[in-house]
Image: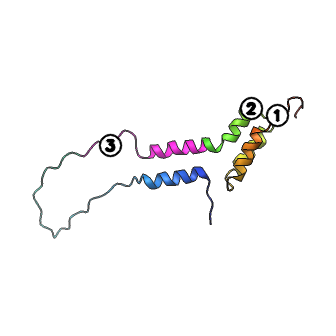
Amino acid sequence: MRFVTAPLLLLMAFSAVTDASPKRKPTPSPSMSPSPQIASPAPAPTPSGDSSTGFWILTMLGVAAYFIPTAIAAYRKHPNSNSIFAMNLLLGGCFGIGWIIALVWALTAIDKSRTYR
């Protein structure tokens, strides 16, 4: 069984809901007799933006949510923020355990009296 990160699951669910493939009308066969053409109403206008706009918005939100531990560590000026970023990037998608560990690590107390290299 293949495990997928939460942001990727959101993207997969959204892409299944918004199937952007255009629906084509079947073309009549040449053996069919031509029918009189009746004027049909104009098609309804589509909303501005294409169907992939929602996909990209969800992608950006997923990436932002994925790197929350890194953003917290950078905001708090954590001395191990580079290591937290590396753990978040490389192990964040492993069953979510790496992401939780990175989040807890980013939220740990910083000892101001200790000098870090």
Left or right of 7? Residue 82 is right
Residue 30 in the image: state x and y as whole percent: 18, 68
The residue that mark 2 highlights is 76
Q: Which residues are magenta?
A: 43-63
Tell me the residue at 72%/43% (across/down): 103
| Colour scheme of the picture | rainbow
User: How far from the left and from the top, in percent, is residue 110?
Assistant: 82, 34
Amino acid residing under circle 3: Thr
Residue at the far top: name it: 113
- The residue wearing badge 1 is 110
Cα–Cα span, label 2 and label 3: 45 Å
Q: Residue at x 66, y 42 (%)?
A: 67
Q: Quadrant of residue 25?
A: bottom left
User: As shown in the figure, which amino acid type bears the numbered disc 1?
Assistant: Ile
Task: Indicate which disc, 1 or 3, sits on the residue closer to the N terminus.
Answer: 3
Question: How busy is the neighbourhood of tag 3: few (under 14 within 10 Å), some, or many (20 plus)?
Answer: few
Mark pair 1, 3: CA separation: 53 Å
- Relative to 115, is 70 on the left or the right? left
Measured along the vertical axis of the image, is residue 68 above or below residue 3? above
**Along the viewing direction, whichever of 51 and 73 lies nearer the viewer:** 73
Q: Which residue is under mark 3?
A: 46
Q: Amino acid at mark 2?
A: Arg
- The image quadrant where one finds the C terminus is top right
